[in-house]
Image (tube, grey):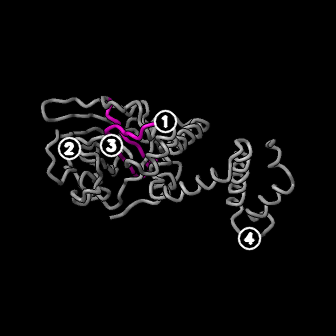
């Protein structure tokens, strides 16, 4: 059938009524966005002659996959697309520079201990090599950023995050902290080297990726938020440049400038990494997005 079917008065009237276009109440922006989504979906159904079984199979998958949407969204590239979109908007405004943003992922937990000075993130016994990371947080003119708080979190040497570990062997906030930086914007922490991991085997994300001919592996990495008065909050992460999946991260988090290679000396791996923040145009840019996050 020709895609023009979607433009018939019967279908257009349905879309208008379904999204409340003929009603005075409701949220006008939501109405407009949902109408575009429904029309685009209708066009896809017609273009690909999607069967009733295929349609309800997709609905069933989304229902079953609700618990893994935090993995599916980055896995299909949408979370990275948001980063690319924000980058493009910055470029239009003439805003350049700063440490690249990249995806947050679904495994942040609010309320990690706030510490000063060099932090030891690892609270549980772990016989893998030690990671020592340090650097400075600076502004766009090279100035040290004062009163910054660096949030850091990563997996353990088995690829599990505390609070999400199915083995239940990690203590709360293992490999997680908020570090209050000193006046010169310098930070330092030590922990145990994280391991890369894959999406849960045979779960919804894994089934989708396999159907696409893709894998669900992530390289070893460390997540960061950095917040400071007068500066944009930065969401980013480093992928270890020598990890076999560094250039093939299923979540598309790898970005140029975020691939340090650990300097391994005996049982210690060192990473020196500086962050550059952009100045905030208003207080709205200093805070966190309205994403739902776990809390202990």
Mark 1 vs 3: CB contact within 8 A: no
Which tag is nearer the camera, tag 3 or tag 2?
3
Q: Give the range drawn in magenta.
A: 214-241
State the CA–CA distance, disc 2 to disc 1. Answer: 33 Å
Check disc 1 and report the residue beneath it.
213
Could you tell which of marks 4 and 3 lies nearer the N-terminus? 4
Viewer-side label of 1, 3 = 1
Disc 3, SS = strand
Relative side of 103 to 260, left or right:
right
Displayed quadrant of residue 141:
top left
Whole-angstrom CA distance, mark 1 to mark 4, is 45 Å
**How far from the left and from the top, in percent, is residue 111?**
32, 62
Which of the two discs, 1 and 4, labels the residue nearer the N terminus?
4
Q: Is mark 4 on a helix, strand or loop?
A: loop
Q: Residue at x 48, y 45 (%)?
A: 74
Q: Which residue is drawn at 74% across and 70% down?
A: 25
- The 10 Å Cα crowd at callout 4, few under 14, some 14 to 19, many 20 or more, is few
Q: Does the magenta stretch include residue 248?
A: no
Residue 137 on image: x %, y %? 34, 41
The residue that disc 4 covers is 25
Q: Is residue 216 magenta?
A: yes
Q: Alpha-carbon distance for marks 3 and 2? A: 15 Å
According to the picture, the residue beneath numbered tag 2 turns out to be 192
Q: Quick check: marks 2 and 4 in contact, CB under 8 Å?
A: no
Residue at the disc numbered 3: 197
Residue 41 appears in the picture as rendered: yes
**Looking at the image, is mark 2 or mark 1 nearer the viewer?**
1
Q: In this view, does 55 lie to the left or right of 211?
A: right
The location of residue 127, given as percent across then percent down, is 13, 44
Tell whether label 3 touches label 4 (CB within 8 Å): no
Residue displayed at 30% across by 47% down: 154
Picture quarter with the N terminus:
top right
């Amino acid at each position: 059938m020709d895609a023009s079917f979607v433009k018939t008065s019967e279908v257009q009237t349905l879309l208008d009524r379904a999204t409340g276009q003929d009603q005075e109440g409701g949220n006008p922006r939501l109405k407009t966005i949902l109408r575009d989504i429904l029309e685009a979906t209708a066009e896809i159904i017609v273009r690909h002659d999607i069967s009733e079984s295929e349609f309800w199979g997709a609905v069933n998958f989304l229902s079953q996959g609700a618990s893994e949407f935090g993995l599916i969204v980055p896995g299909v590239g949408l979370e990275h697309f948001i980063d690319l979109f924000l980058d493009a908007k910055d470029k239009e405004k003439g805003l350049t520079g700063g440490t690249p943003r990249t995806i947050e992922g679904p495994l942040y937990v609010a309320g990690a201990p706030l510490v000063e000075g060099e932090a030891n993130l690892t609270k549980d016994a772990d016989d893998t090599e030690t990671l020592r990371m340090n650097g400075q947080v600076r502004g766009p003119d090279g100035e040290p950023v004062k009163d910054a708080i660096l949030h850091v979190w990563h997996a353990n040497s088995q690829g599990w995050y505390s609070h999400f570990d199915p083995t239940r062997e990690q203590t709360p906030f293992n490999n997680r902290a908020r570090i209050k930086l000193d006046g010169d914007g310098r930070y330092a922490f030590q922990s145990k080297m994280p391991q890369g991991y894959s999406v849960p085997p045979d779960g919804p994300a894994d089934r989708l990726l396999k159907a696409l001919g893709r894998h669900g592996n992530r390289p070893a990495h460390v997540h960061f938020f950095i917040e400071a008065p007068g500066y944009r909050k930065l969401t980013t992460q480093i992928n270890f440049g020598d990890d076999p999946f560094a250039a093939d991260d299923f979540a598309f988090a790898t970005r140029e400038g975020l691939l340090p290679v650990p300097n391994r000396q005996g049982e210690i791996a060192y990473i020196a990494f500086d962050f550059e923040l952009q100045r905030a145009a208003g207080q709205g840019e200093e805070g966190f997005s309205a994403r739902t996050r776990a809390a202990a």
